[in-house]
Image (spheres, helix red, strand yellow):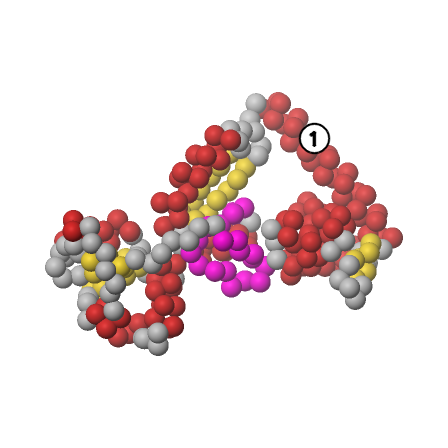
Amino acid sequence: MELNMFSLKVFLAVAEKQSFSGAAETLFLTQPAVSSQVQNLESYFQTLLVIRSHSGAIKLTDAGKIVCDYANKFVVLSKELLRDIEKQTGKSMMQLRLGACFIAGTHLLPALMKAFIDKYPTVQVSLKVTKGEDVFQGLLTGSFDIGITGLSPKNKFLVKKKLYEIPLTIFEAGNARKQCERVASIRELIGTPLIMREEGAGTRKSFQEFLNKHHVNMKDFQFITVSESNEAIKRLQWLMVGRATATY
């Protein structure tokens, strides 16, 4: 492996908090991810850098103290380098790369991004809207700094924080103008043709979990079609007035 700034920053957080869990909470990482970065450094230098006690607290070895001293210098130098390049080019080097599922990227993030940009105008913010699993992969490969999706990550190196909760709603074609709300039974849904999101979509997974909780099989439902596009689902819903119910 190559020596990288991310591993050094994680190591500095561990040294400061004297705890892997404390560093993980500070950096919004999982504890296994923090442990992995420290292990990478120990493998690179081929020596033990921290000693873990039974209480969970850690103590730096002599080699660990040397790495900590140099890591602090590297962090200071990297900040000075970015500052001088920004002065030379007149451009900010600070970036925030977001990855989001279709629902969050279309309906939730635009307003949040505007508020963030208004507060931090010098930060370059980018957003890629893609499938939830692709968001997780982007986080693992370093393509995204933050991912927002309705799915929960399965990888132990990704940590999740609850941002917003949206109820799962069933929309019935032809009844939009009635402005009425009612509770639909599962038996009623089984007998109604459905337009569904694609496999792996967060809303579909939520619907699947709801059915599993009530011991109902997804195969019992009649699907008209499956689509990755919310707009396509909406348009098809109106074309199928009186026939279909779309869930998303």
Q: Could you say which quadrant of the image residue 180 lies in?
A: bottom left
* Label 1 neighbour load within 10 Å: few <14, some 14-19, many 20+: few
- Which span of residues is magenta-colored? 143-162
What is the magenta segment's predominant secondary structure?
loop
Left or right: where does residue 190 sit relative to residue 213? left
Could one spot residue 70 in this view of the protein?
Answer: yes
| Residue under the point 16% across and 54% down | 175
Give the image location of residue 24, x and y in percent.
65, 54
Give the image location of residue 40, x and y in percent.
71, 57
Closer-to-camera residue (213/103): 213
Closer-to-camera residue (137/113): 113
Give the image location of residue 102, x and y in percent.
37, 50
Please state which amino acid type lies under the numbered disc 1.
Glu
Give the image location of residue 80, x and y in percent.
70, 30
Q: Which quadrant is home to the N terminus? A: bottom right
Q: Which quadrant is home to the C terminus? A: bottom left
Q: Does the magenta stretch include residue 159?
A: yes
Task: Please say if 34 is above or below 91.
Answer: below
Name the residue tied to disc 1: 80
Closer-to-camera residue (44/171): 171
Q: Could you say which quadrant of the image residue 50 lies in?
A: bottom right
Task: Please say if 217 is above or below 226.
Answer: below
